[in-house]
Structure formats: structure tokens, C-alpha cells
Image (cartoon, grey):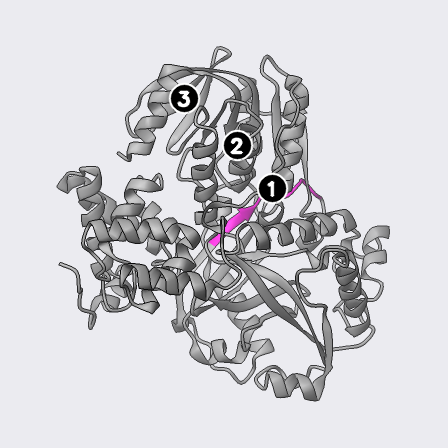
Amino acid sequence: MPEQRDENLELIRRDGAFDVLVVGGGINGIGVYRELALQGLRVLLIERSDFCSGCSSAPSRMIHGGLRYLENGEFDLVRESLTERDALLVNAPHMVRALPTTIPIWSVFSGLLNGAAGFLGLSDKPASRGALPIKIGLSLYDWKTRKRRLLPKHSFRGTRKTLRRWPHLSPRLRFSATYYDAWISYPERLGVEMVLDTNDLAPESAALNYAQVENVAGNFVVVDGPTGDRLRINAKVVVNATGAWLDEALGLLSGKGAHDEPFVSGTKGSHLMLDCPPLLEALGGHMIFFENADGRVCIVFPYLGKVLAGSTDIRVRAAARVRCEPEERDYILDALRLVFPDVAIDAKDIVFSYSGIRPLPRSDHAFTGRISRSHFVHRVDGATPQFCMVGGKWTTFRAFAEQTADAVLAELGRKRVRDTLGLAIGGGAAFPDDVAELQASIAKRYGIEAERAAYLVDLYGTRADAVVAFCRSREDDCPLDGTTLTTAAEIAYLAASEFVYSLEDMLLRRTPLAITGKVSADIIARVAEVMAAEHGWSSERTANEIAAFVRNLADYHGVSEETLEQRSQGRSLTCA
């Protein structure tokens, strides 16, 4: 078992009295855990699986101001989103980067009355957006960031200039508009870095993955998954940050069972990762933000050398683990062919897929795109007051956490002592303006190749120094195989330093090996071997971890065991 989990379990055993119990270790739960712990409260975060393994592991990987929310009249949400986007560009520059975004436009006036029609209830599904409403929206977008502009203003082009710049876009378009938002490279890692930061800054608080909370006759009991230990705790306040599972958890935590009206109305979003060089080249470094034939917004952009495309937006009846179904895959591929008609795009190009549930506020809108992406805090009375975090999205996690923390502080009669809007996250601390300087410095100091130094800085930011130092102590700079720069010593570092419990944690959420299509049967076996050595797994445990992960890839990510074997063929493992 990871040493960090042992230490946190011991902290709970030593003193089970906490000011706040946060249930749910997705990005909202981690955000409010950090927020409250930094105000001097003693906080316990409990996550039943791995950190950022549920809804938070399946975003579109965009950090954006919400241009289309203007159409719903959600101006405050756009303002908040733009503020948080810009904060993340500064606080986490190792993972959050500017993304030029281009919108192909097919008409001039269409969609001009979308906002008014939706507001008046005259139309649920918006009409196709033409040049004029898009121009108005982008002008508002620029205006809202005029006092603290970090990214360039938008620009417009006609057909000729657009096709000269993107010759593979559909020739039916009449205009294009380019504006700037941002993307996040490793969202799950950012969540873990926040947990690590909080451990350093507030050592009397604790975060525990693979554990659950029970309400036993009004008393809270933490049940540790790996050991089965039952630890009684006390908390003055509970924060329910369970996302799509909020309504289910609300009843369990209160001990009163199900409540009458649900707060969450989830929709399912699926995404594809494509290894399609012609499509990657056709994008020209931009995200293409476009409407599908049914009026839903789709995206496609370069992601870690591959192409990320999505997404669907389908209502779900209940929270559950989900996957990209064949009809969703075809929907996304058909949408790509609509906007890039002369680029050969095939299902065989898919190297990974993923899907998750958006925990949106309950809504009766028939068109899911009209459902608000906003958030609010709802207080539930009880022997221990429960604050429910309803809604939210990746971009605004810090603002949502701040608002929730303020409600909790008011409940406890405590004052805020620290602001997090300008607080660096993990490897974003002291990150230089010129990333090449950091890469060159690490390469020179440790005598490693420039390519590996760039990879490490991309993944760990300024924490790369500690990773390289650890790898050198193991005398290991050798990649796992010929397709990746990840080394066995790096796997050992993550196993020891980042709350890694299972093989899935390592390959899905601490490294990009699975999502970029580099994971193979050989790599899985090699990583499992390293983790077994670090955590003392038996041969039976190691075999079970491999089998469970291979099933997981097949069942939820569209990667079959046969595909894993094919990827191993022709590759030679370079680390013994």
C-alpha cells in the first residue's frame, strides 16, 4: 500500500475530530478540500475510488470561458469562467495553455434570436449560428476580458482566407472566426497536485482515496477499502461533492434515505482519441469549434500528438460508469467528416475513447445544450449540516470551491484568511515564462536528452527536477519501450509519491500512456512489475491488477486485448 495512505490513515486514527468532512474526490471536492484546509480548518477528504476518477476524468479537456453560454443569457457564468480560465493560465501554466479556436460559419443572420427565443420559451433547440450572432458573442467575450487581457482578441475571415489557411475545411463555409481559450493537458494530474499541495500546506488535514463514509446511527465511520479498517470520525459540517452521485450520497450521509426532488440532472459526454495524421495536420494547431447537423456543438483539437474529438450530450436516468457506445462513436466521426469532408477519417484511427456524466443542475429542457453549466450550494439541515455542491465544470472548480468554502466558514463562524485566486498549483509554481529555459536547465544539470527533459517538464512542470533526481538515484533513464519516454524509475516515483493504489491509477490518471494509445501488453506487464516491487504485491495481486486493467480498457475505453497484443508486436522493451 502507498506510504501516503498509511500516513493519512494513522492521522485519522490518532485524531478523528475534523471541522469538515468532504465526500467526493473529484475536482470540486479537491478544490473545496484545499480551500477549507488553507483557511486553518482541519479537513478530511474521502473518495471511494481514485482521485479524479469519475466525472472529473472525462472532460473535454478545455479550460474555457463558455462562449455558447452567452446564448443562454448566463453572463455571470461567462464572466466567472473567463476569470478562472485566466487564473489557471497563470497558476498552472505547465498544464493549462492557450488554445486558438476557429469557428467555421455557414450563414450570416441565422441564430440571431436564439437567446431571446430560449429566454421566452419560444424555442428550445437553437438555430444554426450565423456570422452576425457569432460576431456579437465574440465581441462580448473580448469586452469581458478587456481589463486583464491575457489572450489575443478575436478575428474574422471570409471564405477565401479561411480555405487558404485550412484547405481541408468544408468549402460550403462562408466565414470563419478565431478566438482564444485554453486546454488542459493532464486534468487528473492537476487534481492530484492540489492534494499534494494541501498536504504540504495543511498537514493536519488528510485526503484518502479508496475509502467510503457511512452514517451509523448519526455517527460517521470511514471504511478503508484496502484494509477494511473502520475508523470513527466526527465532523461539524459535511460537504457533499459527489457530482453525478450527489442525490444518492445526500441520503446516505444524512441517514434519512432518498429525498423527494433530485438536484442533479446528468448528461453523458463521450470523446474519441484519434491517431490520424492527416486530420492533425488539417487542424493547423487550432481547435475547430463547430455545429453538427443537429445543432449540437462539437470540438476537435490537437492533444498530446493525437486528435481529441467530441462530444455527445445525452440525458442519463441515473449515475453510473459509462462508455462511448458505437452510435456515439459514429455520431462524432460523422460530425468530423461534415466539417473535414476530404480527410479520410475511420474508426480504425481511434486509439482510445472515454465517457463521463456531467453533473448538471436539474432541468426540464428537452435540448440538453440549453441546460445550465452553472453551479450553486444547497444547505441541508441535520444534526450535521450538509452543503451540497450542485453542478459545476472543470474551468470554474476554484470559484465553486471558494463559494462553498465561504458558506461553510459562515456556518462555523470562521473568517477567510487566505485567497486562492493567485495561488500556484503543483508544478506551476515558479514556472518560467520561457519553458525552453527550464527544459535546457534540467537537460544540462542531469545530462539527459533534450527530448526527455521536454517530456518531463510537460508532465511535471517545475516538479520535474525532483522526478529526474529520483530517477537518477535509481540509475534509470531508460524508456519502457521504443514509443514512450516514460521510464521504470518514473513509475516507481509516481507509485511512491502520488497516492497510486492500482495499476489503473497509474496508466489512466498519472501517466498519458493509455489516453495517447501507447499502452501495450508489454508496457502493462512492465509497469505492473515495477508497482509490485514498490508496493509489495504478491504474484496473484499483480496478475489480478493486470487482468482488471485489461478488462477496463476493453469495457470502457474501446481498447481490446487483441489491440494491446498488436501494439506490442514490433516493439522491443528496452528496460530489463
Whole-number angstrom distance, CA of label 2 to CA of label 3? 17 Å
Instruction: Looking at this view, name the residue that lies furthest to the top.
Output: 217
Point out the tag, 2 or 1, that comes first from the N-terminus: 2
Q: Position of residue 475 (x, y in %)?
A: 18, 54
Residue highlighted by disc 1: 398
Q: Which is more N-terminal, label 3 or label 2? A: 2
Visible in this render: residue 147? Answer: yes
Q: Which residue bears the numbered disc 2?
A: 33
Magenta stretch bounds: 355-363
Element type where label 3 sits in the image: strand
Q: CA distance from mark 1 to mark 3?
A: 26 Å
Query: Is there a contact, CB below 8 Å, between mark 2 and mark 1?
Result: no
Q: Amino acid at mark 2?
A: Tyr
Q: Which amino acid lies under the numbered mark 1 shown in the image of this protein?
A: Arg
Picture residue at 55% right of the left edge, 38% below the top: 31
Visible residue check, residue 547: no
Magenta segment: does it hold 285?
no
Is residue 358 one of those drawn in magenta? Answer: yes
Give me the disc on residue 222: 3
Q: Amino acid at mark 3?
A: Val
Q: Secondary structure at mark 1?
A: helix
Residue occupying the point 23% across, 49% down: 546
Residue 155's x, y, as percent? Answer: 72, 74
Residue 404 falls left or right of residue 252:
right
Q: Give the mark nearest the N terminus, 1 or 3.
A: 3
Q: Position of residue 100 (x, y in %)?
A: 61, 69
Q: Between marks 2 and 1, how big is the CA–CA gap?
A: 11 Å
Element at badge 2?
Answer: helix
Give the foreground label among 2 and 3: 2
* Left or right: 91 as drawn, with respect to 44: right
